[in-house]
Image (spheres, grey):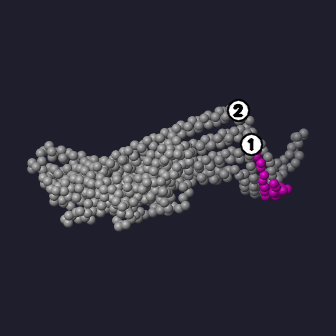
Amino acid sequence: MKHPLLSVLSVSLLAGCASIAPEPFSSEEIKARVARDQQEMYKDQAPILQPITFHDAVARALTYNLDYRLKLMESALAQGISDSSAFELLPRLTASAGYNARNNDSGGTSVSIITGEETLSPSTSQERRHNLRSAELSWNILDFGLSYYRAKQAGDEYNIAEERRRKVRQNIVQDMRNAYWRALGAQRLLVQVEALTKRIERALEQSRQAEASGVLPPAQALAYQRALLDALTLITLKRQELEFARHELAALMNIKPGTVFQLADAPEESLPPVPVRVAELEIQALENRPELREEDYRARIDGFEARRQLIALLPGIEFVAGSLYDSNKYLYNNSWYDGSVRISWNVLKLAAYPTVKRTQEAREKTAEARRLALSMAVITQVRVALERYKLALLDYRQTDESARVDERLAQISQAGVSSRVESELEAVRTEARSLVTQFQRYAAYANAQTALGRILNSVGENVLPDELESRDLATVAKQLQHRLVAGEREVFSFVSADVARPQSLRVEVAGLPASLAAPAIVEAVSERLRQSRLLIGGEAGGSAVFRMTLKRGPVRNGVERSAWEMSLHDAAGKHVATHSYSTVLTPDLPQRSAQAFAEAAALSQVSFLREQLTAPATTAARPGETGPRPAALAR
């Protein structure tokens, strides 16, 4: 064969192409990928060493949440593309080198045009083997213009990625509000649920025994059993609903499944009143919403695209300059400089100008219509968010009051428990109903927090600075808390800098018989008031004093009419007010009944105590405002 090497290469290429076939991943490769992904998902996370507050939870979500990490990477990618597109504005500098070889000499002869006879013997001016080197600098003005607008578009694509990242950050905070407060409610009530579930099971067994022995009529026993089973079902459903929020919270924080963590049992934040500056909030939303800013960048990208299409219709002018070298010994000059100017113009492209112009006009009108529709949607979201928050506040206040009423009923029923079966069953039933309303109250509070966050989200409040000074979780949590408080302060029109910390309260009990343990009653009442979001302090000074004195009445018909006389004194010892709470007790007055009676009496004064212990806030009027603004609620 004349070309054996070429034949061998051809056969090898054909054999290689024939050997390519679909190759699925093996099970070992898939298992290795799963193990690698599981390790990467929870890599480099700070351990949980203490109970997690709300701001700590949000800081963890913004640091470790995988969706947010993805947006960070997309933003970094867009920035890299923007930076690299700027290099397209530079001229092209092309360096090349080569080696030419042939097996015989190149050459030629000359023939006379007139006579057609050969005038020169065959000759050559090129070596069989020689080297080539060149470096050329070229710059096309048309390409420069196109690259310039392409770079501007890439910059706006990065801005769009940043706005999307900001939106994801806002959505994470929104989801965290709902999940955190629901999970905290489930954590607070979990111990009570377990204890009450055991009591309900015992009460069911007692009612069955009472029915079988004839102590209770069958209809009454079955009615109690039905009520107890209904209460147990409701408790189970509410518990599951809130506990699901704990798993959702762990997923948002990217906590590895099975990790044990506790939420900080801090007092609930007071909910501010509904904003009244609706028009200002709408303008703020139109200025700050990431979606509208993205539309602004989209419109600018469309404008750059129109300019690029118009520039593409113009002629292209290219400047070329270079240095060349050829090792051919027959050349007189082996190295030289070369320069040229070339102009090219596709004249037929001018026919596309009317189409380009119409397309641009249609693109501008479409972008404007899309922005206006989105603006209307944003305004609607602001108003709907305000209305939802108003309804959520109303629902929370109603469920809060219902929870206190049911809690007092449960305490009164517990205080009046006797040895009769129906008395114990009634106490269990009222306690179950009280626990169900407690679940409803925590769910209503979480809904109110979610509605509050939805207002901030609809307005487009930034939850964190664009650039963090540190990635430390504690630092991020502090920055987050500062920014969220500042955002709420602006949206809800209150100034928290002048809001005094709610005064703490100390409980004292007097008038008890020697058979009763006063410290246990003080602790039980303090815990009830603490659960009602009052600040309880144990120090002897610096706290208001809530003094409860038991006044026992005469025994009539086997019961006595007793009352708790409750007086409030401020930190200076000045008397504020005195209230009384009466009920009927058994003369033997067991510890459990006295304690439940004291808790019911204290719960009846929660609203009064909260009003007296929360100092009124001073507010500053905004420019142009003449009327009073709503006072701030203590946070």
Task: Give coordinates of residue 368: x percent, y percent.
Answer: 59, 37
**What is the secondary structure assignment of the residue under circle 1?**
strand
Task: Give coordinates of residue 632: x percent, y percent.
Answer: 45, 52
Residue drawn at (14%, 49%), measured in percent from left and top?
208
Position of residue 86 in the picture relative to residue 279 (left or right): right
For the magenta stretch, what is the residue range?
A: 317-337
Question: Residue farthest to the right?
Answer: 114
Judging by the rendered image, the residue that carries numbered circle 2 is 351
What amino acid type should be assigned to the residue bearing mark 1?
Gly
What amino acid type should be assigned to the residue bearing mark 2?
Ala
Judging by the rendered image, the residue that carries numbered circle 1 is 316
1 and 508: which one is in front?
508
108 up-or-down from 357: above or below: below
Q: Is residue 118 magenta?
A: no
**What is the secondary structure assignment of the residue under circle 2?**
helix
User: Given contact means CB atoms under 8 Å apart, are the residues at marks 2 and 1 in contact?
Assistant: no
Question: Which quarter of the figure has residue 585?
Answer: bottom left
The quadrant of the picture occupied by the C terminus is bottom left
Position of residue 151 in the picture relative to residue 257 (left or right): right
**Distance between the Cα atoms at labels 2 and 1?**
17 Å
Residue drawn at (55%, 37%), measured in percent from left and top?
372
531 and 362: which one is in front?
531
Task: Give coordinates of residue 41: x percent, y percent.
Answer: 45, 57
Q: Is residue 325 magenta?
A: yes
Magenta span: predominant SS is: strand
- The 10 Å Cα crowd at callout 1, few under 14, some 14 to 19, many 20 or more, is some
Residue drawn at (24%, 59%), measured in percent from left and top?
550
Q: Can residue 337 be seen here?
A: yes
Residue drawn at (12%, 50%), measured in percent from left and top?
210
Task: Give coordinates of residue 37: x percent, y percent.
Answer: 45, 56
Question: Along the polypeptide, which appears first: circle 2 or circle 1?
Answer: 1
